[in-house]
Image: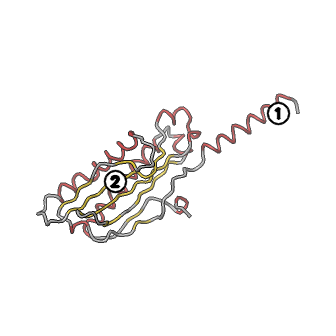
Amino acid sequence: MNITSKALLLASCLFGAVLLQGCGGTRIKASATSNPPPSEAFSAFGRIEVRPVVFGSDVKVDRDGLDKIEANLQKDLSASLLEWNTRPANGRSLVIQPVIEQMNFKRGATRVLLGPLAGSSGVLLRLKITDGKGRRVANPEFFQRANAMSAGFTLGVHDNLMLTHVASLASRYIINNYSRAEGGATGADLKSVHP
């Protein structure tokens, strides 16, 4: 084998290794595939407040990702919250605090330049749901990911859809548990759950 062939083979192997490394799954994982029901239906509370989304203490701040999740939560919940909060007050309030516990969001420019080599995106969102006295009513989590290959070849569309879907899962949990405490999906499949 001549020197040119060896160099080409070595370069191909290195490129393949880099490609496989970039295409690896996100390290973000959920703890389960479904959330348990809250301690009581949310209709038991006369007032329901959904606070703005915040980052957990150990999360690298990504304002773009947070803003997309916040906008989708507001869009999904505004009509329901308006209806629920026009009922007569009963002295009980429910506070819902969305917290991004983990997020690895590949932006459009990174996706366009690197495609699948940028790696997978992932997000884990938790709703800390308490009553007016601070007692926990529910603590559901919601997970979504964008596979490196599919997100890379759609130039970041899947990365953005991941944020829309995680907000949709959280909104659906709130709406579905209003009349009856029933729990809901986390959005994770078995491969995305911590062993």
Q: Mark 2 or mark 1, which is nearer to you? A: 2
Quarter of the rendering containing residue 143: bottom left
Disc 2 marks which residue? 98
Rendered residue at 87%/30% (across/down): 2
Neighbor class of circle 2 (other Cα within 10 Å; few <14, some 14-19, many 20+) is many
Q: Residue furthest left?
A: 88
Distance from the alpha carbon under mark 2 to that under mark 1: 54 Å
Residue at (33%, 49%) from the top-left corner?
Answer: 53
Q: Residue at x 42, y 61 (%)?
A: 186
Tell me if residue 135 comes above or below residue 168 in the rendering: below
138 left or right of 48 in image: right
Q: Is residue 1 or residue 129 the one in the foreground?
A: 129
Image quadrant holding the N terminus, namely top right
Quadrant, the C terminus: bottom right
Kind of residue at disc 1 = Lys
Q: Is 84 left or right of 19, judged from the image as shown?
A: left
Q: Residue at x 28, y 71 (%)?
A: 40
Q: Position of residue 85 (x, y in %)?
A: 16, 58
Residue 151, relative to residue 83: is it above or below?
Answer: above
What kind of element bears circle 2? strand
Q: Which residue is mark 1?
A: 6
Q: Label 2 sits on what residue type?
A: Pro
